[in-house]
Amino acid sequence: MKANNKSLNEIGAEDIKEAVREKYSKVAKNPCATFNFPVGKKFALKVGYPKEVLDKLPPSMYESFTGANNPQPFIELKEGERVLDLGCGAGLDLYFYAKAVGQEGKVYGLDISQDMVNKTTSNMNAMGIKNAEIKCGHSDSLPFKDNFFDVVASNGIYNLAPDKEKVMSEVFRVLKLGGRTVFSEIVLKEALPENIRKNMDDWFKCIGGALSEKNFLGLMEKVGFKNIEVISKIKNARTGHKFAICANIKAYKTTTED
């Protein structure tokens, strides 16, 4: 029985990861297909990506966009920083990050789907982006050494991950001391009743795997993050359920004395 036909209680972590990989490979290869979550330029514009920039980009850059929000207004990158975009998709956020850190900086993209990785690589090459490196891998086992990044960014990947604590621990591990994680994520005002969390379709609606805001921030504290700030919370096309909100969050890897 395929994961989509099982209840969430019957689906293992590896089944979920494989279902996510398959789904986002379809988004990469056929972004105009019908999905039960928003995809593409129209959604990107609604969450605030600048029209004047998107209009100048090739459609392949934004047609597979499936983020939770637009983290660009609060990412606050500096020239020369080393940045990881976790779950980079087709590279829309990565493009903005690469421009922000300049040639003295470096951006890395990681995605679970090789099709997305291929698309991002093609997009970066087409736009003449030289300071980007794209890898295929899992967010719960990052292919990077300890204390490597100034910033780890993401845009709606935690709710898709079966082991959120492991992902957070990996993000903490690869950040430099004093580094920060800045991201947009779907969280819940309160836990969902089990009869709402039925199958993988609910997972892709960003509610089946989402945590309550309290539990999500609690996990961040547990793995070691300090100075955790919920910058803002909004509703958008990714938060159709009445309990769902998109939280924009920043936190730091600091010493215990900070």
Image: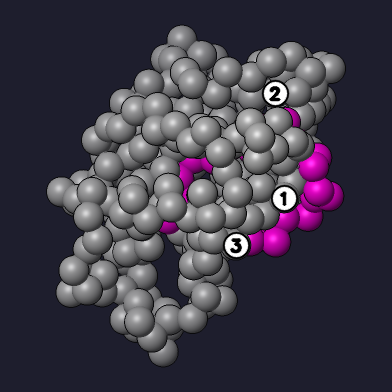
Classify 10 Å Cα crowding around label 2: few (below 14), some (14-19), many (20 and above).
Answer: many
In the picture of the structure, the residue carrying the numbered disc 3 is: 166
Please state the horizontal and vertical placement of residue 5, each as a whole percent of the image: 33, 81
Q: Which of label 2 and label 3 is nearer to you?
A: 3
Give the residue type that dot 3 points to. Lys
The one of 117 and 109 positioned closer to us in this rendering: 109
Earlier-in-chain disc, 2 versus 3: 2
How far apart are the two marked residues, 3 and 1, measured between alpha carbons?
Answer: 10 Å
Q: Which mark is residue 246?
A: none
What residue is at 42 percent from the left and 43 percent from the top? Answer: 185
Tell which tag, 1 or 2, sits nearer the viewer: 1
Q: Which mark is residue 173?
A: 1
Residue of label 2: 98
- From the top left corner, tell me how far across and down residue 12 is, in percent: 49, 81
Residue 21: say if magenta: no
Marks counted in the figure total 3
Kind of residue sitting beneath label 2 = Ala
Residue 122 can be seen, yes or no: no
Could you say which quadrant of the image residue 51 lies in?
top left
Q: Earlier in the sequence, mark 3 or mark 1?
A: 3
Judged from the image, the secondary structure of the residue bearing numbered disc 3 is helix
Q: For the C terminus, which image quadrant?
A: top right
Disc 1/disc 2 C-alpha distance (Å): 22 Å
Q: Residue most toward the top?
A: 52
Percent across and percent down for residue 103 are 82, 16
Image quadrant containing the N terminus: bottom left
Q: Magenta residues?
A: 136-159
Q: CA distance from mark 2 to mark 3?
A: 27 Å
Along the line of sight, which residue is nearer the eye, 221 or 80? Answer: 221
